[in-house]
Amino acid sequence: MHRADTPGHTTSLSTKSKILSRDELRQRVEEWRRAGEHITLANGNFDLLHVGHVRYLHGAKALGGKLVVAINSDQSVRALKGKGRPVMPENERAEIVAALADVDAVVVFPELDVRAIIREIRPDVQAKGTDYTIDSVPERDTVTEYGGRVEIVGDPKDHSTSEILRTRFSQRKS
């Protein structure tokens, strides 16, 4: 991550303080739990933030408590989405997501799915977007084995970074 006082970068301290390492995240979650807070986890690539992302995160925050957002690292996005992705580097994606009022903490993770973070912080709720059903959430068993629950939030899957890129690039070629 670049420093907030680097020329040309005016990131607020509060935004930067939301971007945490895995160890910092575990500590922050422990502090929140001691204060009686519930923890909701949302995750994704968040490459080219769009209204679908904003609505997903707003829906996750509406479930209550502190909202932690786990963002796939550049390497895991490439493995999941292919060559040319992500469009934006992980530190910028984390900064943009951290700037959203609904988000309380952001962590970047290298794994292909969020199971390891679920095991580390044991969120009360894992929020997934409407491209999933409760039964199709890959990490559902990991969440339910300690008594957490999975919720589907956000608007219908009418927005996708892949589709935006496909549409924009095909229009340019025409």
Image (spheres, rainbow, N blue to C red):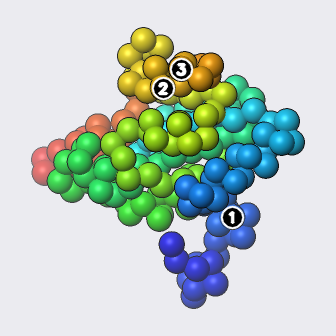
Kindly report the distance in space between the C-alpha atoms of the residues bearing marks 1 and 2: 28 Å
11 lies above or below 129: below
98 lies above or below 58: below
Q: Which residue is mark 3?
A: 145
For the point 57% across and 88% down, the residue is 7
Q: Tag 2's secondary structure?
A: helix
Q: Position of residue 54 (x, y in %)?
A: 56, 39
**Residue lying at the far left of the rendered structure:** 174
Q: Are marks 2 and 3 in contact (CB under 8 Å)?
A: yes
Q: Position of residue 76 (x, y in %)?
A: 31, 50
Q: Tag 3's secondary structure?
A: loop
In this rendering, position of residue 14 left or right of residue 170: right
Q: Amino acid at mark 2?
A: Thr
Q: Tag 1's secondary structure?
A: helix
Among the two numbered marks 1 and 2 on one chain, the one whose residue lies closer to the N terminus? 1
Tag of residue 17: 1
Decide which of 8, 42 is in the foreground and name it: 42
For the point 64% across and 59% down, the residue is 24
Tag of residue 142: 2
Kindly report the distance in space between the C-alpha atoms of the residues bearing marks 2 and 3: 5 Å
**Residue lying at the far bottom of the rendered structure:** 7
Q: Amino acid at mark 1?
A: Ser
In this rendering, position of residue 66 left or right of residue 160: right
Kindly report the distance in space between the C-alpha atoms of the residues bearing marks 1 and 3: 31 Å
Q: Amino acid at mark 3?
A: Glu
Which of the two marks, 1 or 2, is nearer to us in this view?
A: 2
Q: Position of residue 125 (x, y in %)?
A: 62, 26
Q: Is residue 10 visible?
A: yes
In this rendering, position of residue 70 left or right of residue 113: right
41 lies above or below 125: below
